Amino acid sequence: MQHSGSCLCRAVSVSAEGAPMLARMCWCRVCQYLGSGNATVNAAFPVSSVTVDGPVKWFTDTADSGNEMWRGFCGECGTPLFSKGTRFPDRMVIRLGVFDDINAITPAGAIWTSSAPDWAKIDDNGPLHTHQPPVTP
Ligand SMILES: [Zn+2]
Ligand SMILES: [Zn+2]
């Protein structure tokens, strides 16, 4: 199955082949900056299955987990598109808002729930983790 989409201005197009390795929400403090106060919703794919075309701008920082992370944005419109980290160099995390079919991937569970604001509605249809979970395949 092919998942395809783009940023808001369509300067960056993204496609990912096959089912995601996992899809879930992240309530870490960094994601609240990226998600306008909310959790980000993310699907992880093997880097080898992802094709990207367009001007992606990468921002490097250290995540709450202590891992070095690269966050990818459209260089034109600023849409959050990706994250990659030193912990999983073979994994590309794609923000679900990128995909044309918004119902093709359903997130299950959330991480960093301890950082969520008091008003957050935590989706518990999957595993919940207060912090960064142990390594999953
Ligand atoms: Zn754009
Ligand atoms: Zn996060």
Image (cartoon, rainbow, N blue to C red):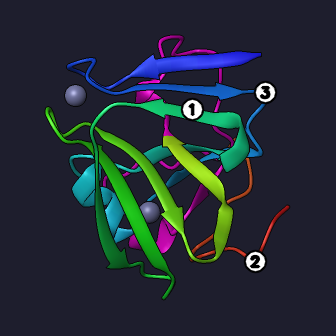
Q: In which quarter of the image is the N terminus?
A: top right
| Residue annotated with mark 3 | 18
Which residue appears at 62% of the width and 36% of the height? 50
| The one of 57 and 134 positioned closer to us in this rendering | 57
Labelled disc at residue 51:
1
Can you see residue 125? yes
Label 2: few (<14), some (14–19) or many (≥20) C-alpha neighbours in 10 Å: few
Our reading of the magenta stretch's main secondary structure is loop
Give the mark nearest the N terminus, 1 or 3: 3
Labelled disc at residue 134:
2
Label 1: few (<14), some (14–19) or many (≥20) C-alpha neighbours in 10 Å: few
Disc 2, SS: loop
Q: Which residue lies furthest to the top in this view?
A: 101
Whole-percent x, y for residue 63 in the image: 42, 78
Residue type at tag 3? Gly
Left or right, 99 with respect to 61, comes to right
